[in-house]
Image: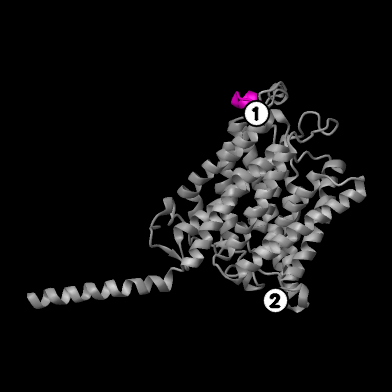
């Protein structure tokens, strides 16, 4: 009996001795620390970054409504992601959607790993992407959608549109290298969300703008931003937070993360400067609104390419983003007269499409200083990128329209004319953003 007891103690001592070594081989503290930091940076992009950016662009009697919408979406999507969204996006499931194995973060504990990082860290990092995507859509229907409708729309859109799309691209679904598209191309290359975040948000915002119709007075009445300092401060937060958005998508503290941050900064700076110059030539004066909008266009465009391209490629992507998104914004508002209130589609949608397609070009190592480090066939990869863009636009556009129809049957999506005139701060929340007369 005593000999058996001694043997048991030796086994326990052996397990205790081996456990730290096993953990050290699995958990990388550097990777984990970087992803924890990136998670905070991406959440910082929505609250307060995007909130301030958008709030400054609307009129002063709607400023609180935008803050409220971004804040509430953060809370709502967090709950949805825990209950169902994460499982649908990253559960094994099928080529089209994940299963329910991760319902309520089932089996995710302190020691549960996803590669070299805790899965709880990975799930929360992905949550911040799920938060900012519907928050971006707010810019398409700003100043005219009921708050109750926003909550219903966000719930349905996150579960039905975002989570499956995330699974297709990042969860091993049919657009990924491991899925159907990967069988005859390299699969869609989307490092940090060109399709999943920017094209999806831009497309949904455009559909929402068309469905709700223009704001009262558009396009004859000037819709002047009420607080550009808010917008500039929010833009600065977005720029810094984007380092976590793109750099964190490497899921490691390594050279890919470092290069992603480098090219992100180059593209943002180049696009902002390009927009400023083009606007200066076109209208005679450079504007603060123009330079910060160009910055966001550069950030959105480099996002899908950020882990694949080099600095010179980022310079070209930023230059094209500033030019193309400037043209798209003016064409949508001035020619087509579509009231995408805060230019979500021409900046994020067009920028995401541009960046996703250009990834196939500037990721190739065949372009020398203008190329990246990927050994790919440009034509073959361009086909994969094009298919990814088309699938995303069709899926998001069609289902977003259906969700808006369903929401409209449940609660009218658009506020009354009287409420729109009064402003959503008072009519919806019974509060004022400023202690002055409107």
Disc 1 packing (10 Å; few <14; some 14–19; many ≥20):
few
> Taking the image as drawn, is residue 330 in sight?
yes
Q: Which residue appears at 86% of the width and 47% of the height?
A: 286
- Report which residue position mark 1 lands on: 433
Q: Indicate which disc residue 124 carries.
A: none
Which sits in the foreground, 201 or 72?
A: 72
Residue 388 at least partly seen: no
Answer few, some or many: residues within 10 Å of disc 2's Cα (few below 14, many 20 plus, some between 14 and 19): some
| Above or below: residue 309 compared with residue 104 | below
In the visual, does 129 lie left or right of 292?
Answer: left
Please say which color scheme the image uses.
Answer: one colour
**Marker count (numbered):** 2
Position in image of residue 324 (x %, y %): 82, 55
Residue 428 is a magenta residue: yes
Mark 2 secondary-structure assignment: loop
Looking at the image, is mark 2 or mark 1 nearer the viewer?
1
Give left or right: position of 278 versus 49.
Answer: right
Quarter placement of the N terminus: bottom left
Mark 1 element type = loop
Q: Residue at x 38, y 59 (%)?
A: 110
**Left or right of 309 on screen, residue 98:** left
Residue plotted at (77% across, 63% down)? 317
Q: Can you give x and y, in whole percent of width and height, for residue 239 in the image?
A: 68, 53
Can you tell which quarter of the image residue 383 is in?
bottom right
- The residue at the point 57 percent across, 41 percent down is 73
Name the outermost residue toward the left: 1
First to last magenta residue range: 425-434
Measured from the top left, where is residue 423 in percent x and y?
Answer: 69, 26
Return the residue at label 2.
376
Q: Which of marks 2 and 1 is nearer the N terminus?
A: 2
Q: Residue 373: horizontal and vertical position, in percent? A: 68, 75
- Point out the image quarter for the C terminus: top right
């Amino acid at each position: 009996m005593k000999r058996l007891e001694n043997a048991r103690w030796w086994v326990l001592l052996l397990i205790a001795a081996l456990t730290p070594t096993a953990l050290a081989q699995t958990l990388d503290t550097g990777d984990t620390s970087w992803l924890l930091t990136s998670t905070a940076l991406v959440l910082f992009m929505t609250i307060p970054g995007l909130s301030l950016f958008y709030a400054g662009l609307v009129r002063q009697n709607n400023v609180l409504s935008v803050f409220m919408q971004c804040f509430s979406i953060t809370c709502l999507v967090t709950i949805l992601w825990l209950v169902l969204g994460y499982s649908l996006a990253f559960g094994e499931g099928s080529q089209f959607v994940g299963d329910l194995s991760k319902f309520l973060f089932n089996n995710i504990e302190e020691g549960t790993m996803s590669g070299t990082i805790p899965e709880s860290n990975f799930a929360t990092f992905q949550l911040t992407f799920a938060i900012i995507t519907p928050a971006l859509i707010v810019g398409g229907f700003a100043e005219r959608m009921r708050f109750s409708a926003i909550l219903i729309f966000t719930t349905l859109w996150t579960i039905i549109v975002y989570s499956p799309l995330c699974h297709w691209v990042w969860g091993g679904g049919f657009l990924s290298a491991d899925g159907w598209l990967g069988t005859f191309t390299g699969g869609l290359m989307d490092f940090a969300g060109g399709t999943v975040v920017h094209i999806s948000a831009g497309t949904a915002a455009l559909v929402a703008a068309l469905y709700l119709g223009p704001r009262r007075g558009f396009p004859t009445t000037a819709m002047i931003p009420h607080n550009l300092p808010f917008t500039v401060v929010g833009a600065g937060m977005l720029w810094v937070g984007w380092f976590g958005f793109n750099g964190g998508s490497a899921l490691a503290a390594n050279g890919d993360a470092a290069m992603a941050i480098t090219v992100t900064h180059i593209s943002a700076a180049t696009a902002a400067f390009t927009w400023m110059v083009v606007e200066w030539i076109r209208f005679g004066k450079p504007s603060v609104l123009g330079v910060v909008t160009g910055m966001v266009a550069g950030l959105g465009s480099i996002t899908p390419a950020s882990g694949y391209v080099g600095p010179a490629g980022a310079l070209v992507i930023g230059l094209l983003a500033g030019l193309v998104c400037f043209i798209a914004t003016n064409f949508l508002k001035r020619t087509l007269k579509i009231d995408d209130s805060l230019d979500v589609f021409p900046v994020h949608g067009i920028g995401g499409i541009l960046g996703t397609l250009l990834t196939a070009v500037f990721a190739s190592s065949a372009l020398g200083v203008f190329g990246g480090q990927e050994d790919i066939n440009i034509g073959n990869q361009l086909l994969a990128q094009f298919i990814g863009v088309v699938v995303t636009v069709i899926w998001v556009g069609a289902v977003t329209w259906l969700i808006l129809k369903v929401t409209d049957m449940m609660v009218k999506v658009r506020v009354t004319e009287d409420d729109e005139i009064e402003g959503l701060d008072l009519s919806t929340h019974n509060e004022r953003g400023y202690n002055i007369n409107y």
